[in-house]
Image: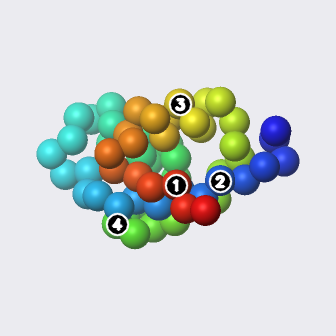
C-alpha cells in the first residue's frame, strides 16, 4: 500500500477555517489555492484528507 500515490488539490481557501484545519492543510503540503501535491496513500494521510474534506479534492 505504501507504493501507491494519491494526488490532493486545495480547492477552497483556508481563510476563516479553524486553526487545526489550516495546520492539517499545511501538513499535507498544500500552500495555496489550486496547488496539487502527490502523497503516499497511507491511513494517516487519508485521515488528514477526511478531516479537511471540504477544502481539498482527490485528483485521479
* Residue drawn at 52 percent across, 65 percent down: 36
Gap between marks 2 and 4, in whole Å? 18 Å
Marks 3 and 4, Cα distance to the nearest angstrom?
21 Å
Left or right: 57, with 2 as reference point? left
Q: Residues within 10 Å of mark 1 (few under 14, many from 20)?
A: some
Residue with the mark numbered 3: 47
Mark 3 vs mark 4, foreground winner is 3
User: Which label belongs to residue 58?
Assistant: 1
Q: Position of residue 27 (x, y in %)?
A: 50, 43
Residue tagged 4: 33
User: Can you tell which of label 4 and label 1 is closer to the viewer?
Assistant: 1
Percent x, y of residue 24 = 42, 38
| Mark with earlier residue (1, 2) | 2
Left or right relative to 47: residue 2 = right
Element assignment for label 3: helix
In primary-sequence order, the first of circles 1 and 3 is 3
In the rendered image, residue 48, in percent from the top left (x then y), is placed at 50, 35
- Distance between the Cα atoms at labels 4 and 1? 14 Å
Q: Is residue 18 above or below residue 6?
A: above
What is the crowding at mark 3: few (fewer than 14 residues within 10 Å), some, or many (at least 20)?
few
Tags 3 and 2 touching, CB below 8 Å: no
- Marked residue nearer the N-terminal end (2 or 4): 2
The numbered mark at residue 6 is 2
Asked if marks 4 and 1 touch (Cβ < 8 Å), the reply is: no
Q: Is residue 34 above or below residue 52?
A: below
Q: Residue furthest left?
A: 16
Amino acid at each position: 500500500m505504501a507504493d501507491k500515490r494519491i494526488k490532493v488539490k486545495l480547492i477552497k481557501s483556508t481563510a476563516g477555517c479553524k486553526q487545526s484545519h489550516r495546520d492539517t492543510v499545511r501538513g499535507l503540503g498544500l500552500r495555496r489555492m489550486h496547488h496539487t501535491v502527490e502523497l503516499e496513500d497511507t491511513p494517516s494521510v487519508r485521515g488528514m484528507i477526511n478531516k479537511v474534506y471540504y477544502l481539498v479534492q482527490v485528483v485521479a
